[in-house]
Image (cartoon, helix red, strand yellow):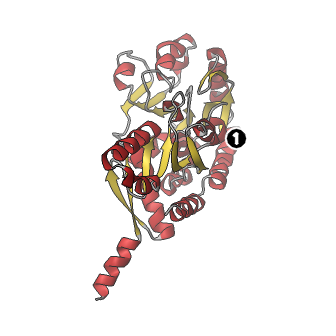
Amino acid sequence: MSDVVSNIDSILRSYIVSVQCEKCSFDEVFTLYKRYFKKYENIDFIKQLGFGGKMFIGDTNVAVAMLNRYKQYIGDKSDNILDNIVLRVDTPRYLINTNVHVSNTVITTSKYNAELFMRNFKNIKVVPHPYDDDALQFYKTTLYKDKKNDIIMIGWNDPDDHKGFRRYFTHTLKKYNLNRYTHNVISNEYSTISSLSLSNVINERQFTLPKRLLYYRMATSKWYLSLSHTEGFQLPVLEALTVGTPIIYPRCHALQEVAFGIAYRCYKVNRDWYDYDDDELADTIEYAMSMPKEQYEDLRMNAIEYVKRNFSPVKVIRYISNILNSNI
């Protein structure tokens, strides 16, 4: 009898959570949620690839497409079931020019996302990513002398070059002689960057490195460089800050809410796209590289305090737990 009760209790303390893909940023978000929900709420997350369950983690276009597909397949009876799925979504630019309207509760990671989502979603909650305790350990064990690499860049780039990688490596790097600084690039642009045969560039494929090795790469780099033209949060920015690596970033879109370090100016091109001047970008990189050790160490310490203050795992998870519990 006790085993039956235990099994029932285990089921009641579990959430099925659907994830868009494996070995992707959404899968990493699920992994972090799973650990912290167990730690702080004693709730198990059970992963389901695809769509359904208590919450979906993925892109907006996938969430909307799956909702529509299920409603067509199941019919009117599906409304209550599907409407109760909490959508934890990013990338508003996929819906920005559509007339899609969704009643589900939406969790997104920045005010920037929420403002762009207002046309498509009724009930939007802004909840940032929580920082990773494992990443914080690297800050505690990495000293200034351990920072052998100058710049690290991480991101999944789309054909429109929204991460700015192709422009930087085919144009900016050589024009401003920035390849005298060591770069570690972890992205899906492996083939493109490799074909350029650039000196001082370590080029690796994204989502192939174990997480602790990725944190080591970040921790032993002086700066994380972001070149995004549009950004809803960029999880690696938070991870870099958590290991003690400040950010060089454009002061626009979600990065002006999330990043901490040295910002360069950018200007709005349209509703969800920003651009920047390459001269100012190069000047900002040069300024960062010439920063005295004492000033850099102060910036690192302030960055960690900023992370702890704004991205507390216990606060984030309890906020999400309240949303899930109220969405029954």
Q: Which residue is mark 1?
A: 294
The image position of residue 170, as x and y in percent, is 46, 14
The image position of residue 14, as x and y in percent, is 39, 67
- Whether residue 82 is situated above or below residue 91 in the rendered picture: below
Closer-to-camera residue (237/195) = 237
Closer-to-camera residue (279/265) = 265
- Whether residue 178 is situated above or below residue 11 in the rendered picture: above
In the picture provided, is 119 more to the left or to the right than 36?
A: right
Residue that appears at 62% across and 31% down: 249
Residue 274 picture quarter = top right
Closer-to-camera residue (241/146) = 241
Q: How many marks?
A: 1
Q: Could one spot residue 285 in this view of the protein?
A: yes
The image position of residue 149, as x and y in percent, is 50, 33
In the image as oriented, which residue stretches furthest toward the front? 76
The image position of residue 232, as x and y in percent, is 56, 37
Disc 1 residue type (three-letter): Glu
Q: State the quadrant of the N terminus.
A: bottom left
